[in-house]
Image: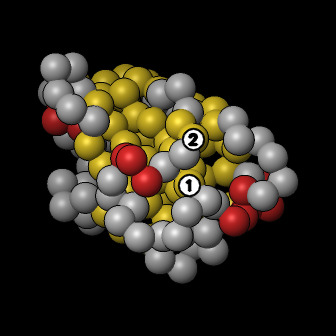
Amino acid sequence: VQLQASGGGLVQAGGSLRLSCAASGRTFSSYHMGWFRQAPGKEREFVAAIIWDGTVTIYADSVKGRFTIFRDNAKNTVYLQMNSLKPEDTAVYYCAATSRPPTDLRRGARYDWWGQGTQVTVSS
């Protein structure tokens, strides 16, 4: 599986961005997907996850109510809609996929494939 993340950029605090992650392959609809981020000098952290059919979503407390993860299996794409952005959201954002059972999707180690990352910068 190859994942291609896009949609990052520079935005002012309070603004919005939508990240996309396009996946190759015919079995995208069977994968659970996640978004993670890594800020300079910090460890990678979980942002959001969605199971294969989109019926269950999970969020980090820091983004709950501001970010929305959703997917379009017909387009082999998962999205992260980010609203009310804050300077502390600045990071490289990565999408990831797993074919394992959807347990503990907050852990990066549960994912088998990763995209290349897209930079999100929020100015104050």
Q: Residue 115: in sight, yes or no?
A: yes
* Residue in the image at 56% along x and 50% along y: 97
Res 110 quadrant in image: bottom left
Ranked by sequence position, the earlier of labels 1 and 2 is 1
Disc 1 designates what residue? 98
The amino acid marked with disc number 2 is: Trp
Frontmost residue, 22 versus 123: 22
Q: Residues within 10 Å of mark 1 (few under 14, many from 20)?
A: many
Q: Secondary structure at mark 2?
A: strand
- The image position of residue 36, as x and y in percent, is 37, 43
User: Where's the C terminus, which quadrant?
Assistant: top left
Residues at marks 1 and 2, CA–CA distance in whole angstroms: 7 Å
Are discs 1 and 2 less than 8 Å apart at CB? Answer: yes
- Which label number is shown at residue 112? none
Disc 2 designates what residue? 113
Res 10 quadrant in image: top left
* Residue in the image at 63% along x and 33% along y: 4
Determine whether 117 is above or below 86 in the image: above
- The image position of residue 45, as x and y in percent, is 26, 43
Q: Is residue 11 left or right of residue 81?
A: left
Frontmost residue, 6 versus 29: 29
Q: Residues within 10 Å of mark 2 (few under 14, many from 20)?
A: some
Q: Is residue 90 left or right of residue 42?
A: right
